[in-house]
């Protein structure tokens, strides 16, 4: 099943909490703090592979959760890191943030990887907070939450040559004749329902060709199927516009070509600006062969390159392929483009979430139980008591905007005092 667009949710793992523990061993009196650091949460990573041709495997699930890190333990034992999830996608996959529409990455190289959701860092255990003044700290960090993103994957096949045209213009027949591809071919419109790729070998040269469903009038406004797949020829170096010259369509070939170009321009000016050849098809039919000279003369007067072919008799096929090979020999390779990765998504080491700390001491437990939390000045009373007791100094090493968890309560440390978090979401992170 060919799938080229998917919307999924990815959730990185949460970091494990740091431990509050003290060494208790025989012959080791006052062993000191021994709480280990929590493990880091697993990240969600995307990897491009030439072996994948569709997003179907990713489409089968709508939510991907990376494992969380394990909490730290006593005896300074660190928690195990959560395993990363690696989603393998076809080369040519673009990754967008679904909410903002921002392009996060464009995977155009085999083996290229990008971390889309970073796992949360594990919290430090109380052994990390021991100082000369506080040799038995009862403080540990909570693990950071991992990033959660709703993303959209769009596949743009990477090929050298793209074949387009109105329905039944002979696109799939051309592909089947010049390559080993076996697209569905019939004498009714829209026999092609998905892009078809084929490898063309000609005079010791090889290139990849893709054909897409037929374009009809109004396609740029969503009519038909072709516009759903035109993205697959956006990366091509050359486009072949197939025009049916047979009399059975009842259409004017010049009008058909003008319609095709109009829909390209409406869809994307950049796509319309790509180099193209005009391919007049079905010249095995006498009426089409008679029409071809005038058709070719009219378009060549406007500076276009025109070739006439018959896929049935192979008339003109070798000449067309010679021209394509010569063009590709001088055209830049798509794979030489610089892979795009959003700068904001690179590993900068910057904090995505505020650091969160958990405090647990008999003094704090007693203080929290004595406070009348229904009083308007309850938090002011807590701050005053912390200041009077000198306990406030233990918060002074925390960075401003750190979250402080005491018993069932969560506060925000401003650098001078505790305040309530600005939002309920912030408190629950």
Image: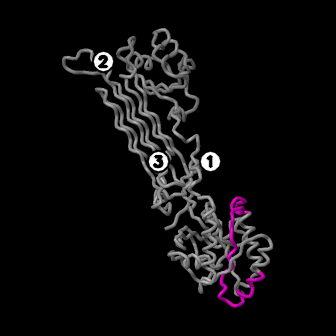
Whether label 3 touches label 2, CB < 8 Å: no
Please state the horizontal and vertical placement of residue 20, each as a whole percent of the image.
Answer: 35, 25
Does label 3 or label 2 sit earlier along the sequence?
Answer: 2
Residue found at x 46% / y 46%: 44
Based on the picture, tell me whether residue 327 belongs to the magenta stretch.
no
Q: Is residue 298 above or below residue 390?
A: below
Label pair 1/2, CB-CB below 8 angstroms: no
Report the mark closest to the observer, 3 or 2.
Answer: 3
Q: For the residues marked 1 and 3, what is the alpha-carbon distance in whole angstroms?
A: 18 Å
Label 1, secondary structure: give it. loop
Of 195 and 237, the residue lying toward us:
237
Callout 3: SS: strand
In percent of width and height, residue 176 lies at: 54, 78
Colour scheme shown: one colour
| Mark number, residue 102 | 1
Magenta segment boundaries in residue numbering: 266-294
Of the numbered discs in the image, which one, if any, rests on residue 179? none
Q: Nearer the viewer, residue 363 or 216?
A: 216
Closer to the chain start, of discs 1 and 2, is 2
Q: Earlier in the sequence, mark 1 or mark 3?
A: 3
The residue lying toward the viewer, choosing from 137 and 275, is: 275
Q: Is residue 4 left or right of residue 238?
A: left
What residue is pinned by disc 3? 45
Instruction: Report which quarter residue 41 is drawn in.
Output: top left
Please report contact status of discs 1 and 3: CB closer than 8 Å, yes or no: no
* Gap in angstroms between the C-alphas marked 1 and 2: 50 Å
- Image: 401 above or below 146: above
**Position of 163 compared to 66: left or right?**
right
The residue carrying pointer 2 sits among few (fewer than 14), some (14 to 19) or many (20 or more) residues within 10 Å by Cα, namely some
- The question of residue 291 being in magenta is answered with yes
Q: Position of residue 116 (x, y in %)?
A: 51, 45
Residue 32 numbered tag: 2
């Amino acid at each position: 099943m060919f799938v080229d667009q998917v919307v999924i949710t990815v959730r990185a793992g949460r970091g494990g909490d740091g431990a509050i523990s003290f060494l208790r061993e025989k012959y080791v009196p006052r062993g000191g703090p021994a709480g280990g650091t929590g493990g880091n949460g697993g990240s969600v990573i995307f990897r491009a592979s030439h072996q994948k041709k569709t997003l179907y495997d990713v489409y089968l699930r709508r939510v991907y959760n990376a494992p969380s890190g394990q909490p730290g333990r006593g005896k300074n034992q660190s928690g195990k890191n959560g395993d990363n999830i690696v989603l393998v996608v076809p080369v040519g996959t673009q990754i967008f943030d679904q909410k903002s529409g921002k392009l996060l990455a464009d995977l155009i190289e085999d083996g290229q990887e990008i971390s889309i959701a970073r796992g949360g860092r594990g919290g430090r255990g109380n052994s990390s907070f021991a100082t000369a003044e506080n040799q038995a700290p009862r403080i540990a960090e909570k693990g950071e939450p991992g990033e959660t993103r709703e993303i959209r994957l769009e596949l743009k096949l990477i090929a050298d040559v793209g074949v387009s045209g109105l329905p039944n213009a002979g696109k799939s027949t051309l592909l089947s004749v010049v390559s080993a591809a076996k697209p569905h071919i019939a004498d009714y419109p829209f026999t092609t329902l998905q892009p078809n790729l084929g490898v063309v070998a000609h005079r010791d040269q090889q290139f990849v060709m893709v054909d897409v469903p037929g374009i009809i009038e109004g396609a740029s406004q969503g009519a038909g199927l072709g516009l759903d797949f035109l993205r697959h020829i956006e990366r091509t170096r050359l486009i072949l516009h197939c025009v049916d010259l047979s009399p059975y369509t009842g259409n004017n070939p010049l009008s058909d070509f003008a319609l095709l170009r109009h829909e390209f321009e409406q869809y994307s000016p950049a796509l319309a600006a790509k180099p193209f050849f005009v391919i007049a098809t079905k010249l095995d039919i006498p009426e089409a062969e008679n029409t071809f000279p005038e058709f070719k003369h009219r378009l060549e007067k406007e500076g276009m390159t025109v070739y006439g072919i018959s896929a049935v008799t192979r008339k003109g096929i070798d000449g067309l392929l010679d021209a394509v090979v010569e063009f590709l020999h001088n055209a830049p390779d798509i794979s030489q483009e610089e892979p795009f990765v959003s700068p904001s998504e690179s590993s900068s080491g910057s904090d995505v979430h505020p650091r969160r700390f958990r405090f647990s001491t008999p003094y704090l437990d007693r203080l929290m139980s004595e406070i009348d939390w229904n009083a308007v000045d309850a938090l002011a009373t807590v701050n005053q008591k912390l200041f009077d007791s000198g306990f406030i100094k233990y918060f002074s090493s925390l960075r401003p905007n750190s979250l402080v968890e005491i018993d069932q309560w969560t506060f925000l440390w401003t650098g001078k005092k505790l305040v309530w978090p600005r939002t309920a979401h912030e408190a629950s992170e």
